[in-house]
Image (cartoon, rainbow, N blue to C red):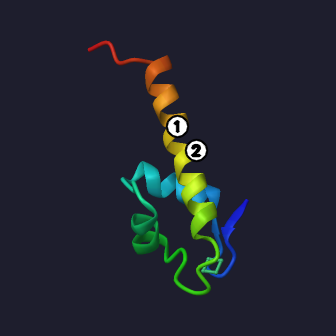
């Protein structure tokens, strides 16, 4: 799903950016240029980012590391 139409950024791009360390919308702006034109995508990007972080936390709880 497209999150930032102006820069053709999808939720998959955001997932990849998160896996590379993005924590905030500002990180996404730096990595993907998201929000650099009309800026109307920032709230949607923030919601997408929150959902990805919640999913990652749930996975970490469901599959703890046994080292
Ligand atoms: S939709 Fe993201 S900058 Fe316009």
Name the image quarter holding the C terminus: top left
Q: Which residue is mark 2?
A: 51
Q: Position of residue 59 (x, y in %)?
A: 50, 27
- Residue for point 59% across, 54% down: 47
Q: Position of residue 26 (x, y in %)?
A: 41, 68
- Residue for point 55% across, 77% down: 35
Q: Left or right: where does residue 46 sit relative to residue 66?
A: right
Secondary structure beneath dot 1 equals helix
- Which picture quadrant has residue 14? bottom right
The correct choice, above or below, for 52 with respect to 20 in the image is above
Q: Position of residue 28 (x, y in %)?
A: 46, 66
Name the image quarter holding the N terminus: bottom right
Q: Residue furthest bottom?
A: 37
- Residue for point 65% across, 82% down: 6
- Residue for point 63% across, 71% down: 41
- Which picture quadrant has residue 40? bottom right
Q: Position of residue 11 (x, y in %)?
A: 63, 57
Q: Residue furthest left?
A: 67
**Label 2–label 1 contact, CB within 8 A:** yes
The circle on residue 54 is: 1
In the image, the residue with mark 2 has its CB under 8 Å from the nearest atom of ligand 1? no
The correct choice, above or below, for 21 with respect to 63 in the image is below
Q: Left or right: where does residue 27 sit relative to residue 62?
A: left
The circle on residue 18 is: none
């Amino acid at each position: 799903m497209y999150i930032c139409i102006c820069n053709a950024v999808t939720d998959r791009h955001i997932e990849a950016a998160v896996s590379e360390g993005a924590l905030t919308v500002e990180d996404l702006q730096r990595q993907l240029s998201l929000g650099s034109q009309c800026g109307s995508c920032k709230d949607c990007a923030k919601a997408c980012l929150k959902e990805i972080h919640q999913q990652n936390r749930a996975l970490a709880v469901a599959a703890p590391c046994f080292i």
